[in-house]
Image: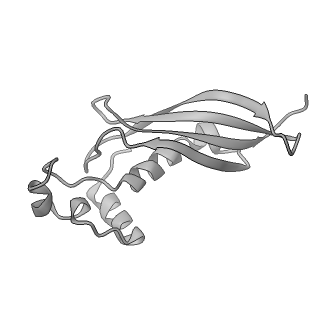
Amino acid sequence: KTITESDNNLFCLLTMNHHPVHMDQVYCGEQQHGQVLVVGTLVFSVVVGMTVSEISGKAIANLDYEHVRHDGPVFVGDTLRAESEVLEARRSRSKPDRGVVYVETRAFNQRGEKILSLRRHVLVPSKGE
């Protein structure tokens, strides 16, 4: 997914995040990165969304998110990709017809630089013993 200026602006408006580091090119020109930074929670949302088809598309629920790290900045025009790894799978302790899968997702920009990592537990239907 390539993050556009419109994506970032709309997300800023929807979430009421009006910090100039996410919207004001002149202000950003005087800051550390010299350009508009994409809102971190937009990056998080896009990365999680990118994993739905392979991780949580048939899940019952995402139970939690943990160890969320913004490993590097994301700028307008960056193209993101994500990869996920199953770290553990077990039966649910309270509902034997369900399982809990522990997943780590890492996201990278078009230069292969890691920009986000997170872990989560996903509740999934379970097939028999």
The location of residue 42, given as percent across then percent down, is 40, 55
Nearer-the-camera pick, 4 or 63: 63
| Number of numbered tags placed on the structure image | 0
Left or right, residue 54 beside residue 9 = right
Q: Quadrant of the C terminus?
A: top right
Nearer-the-camera pick, 60 or 34: 34
Quadrant of res 111: top left
Nearer-the-camera pick, 43 or 63: 63
Tell me: residue 12, above or below residue 4.
Answer: below
The location of residue 57, given as percent across then percent down, is 65, 45
- Residue at 65 percent of width and 41 percent of height: 121
- Residue at 34 percent of width and 66 percent of height: 12
Tell me: residue 122, above or below residue 23.
Answer: above
The location of residue 115, given as percent across then percent down, is 35, 38
The location of residue 41, given as percent across then percent down, is 42, 55
- Residue at 13 percent of width and 54 percent of height: 31
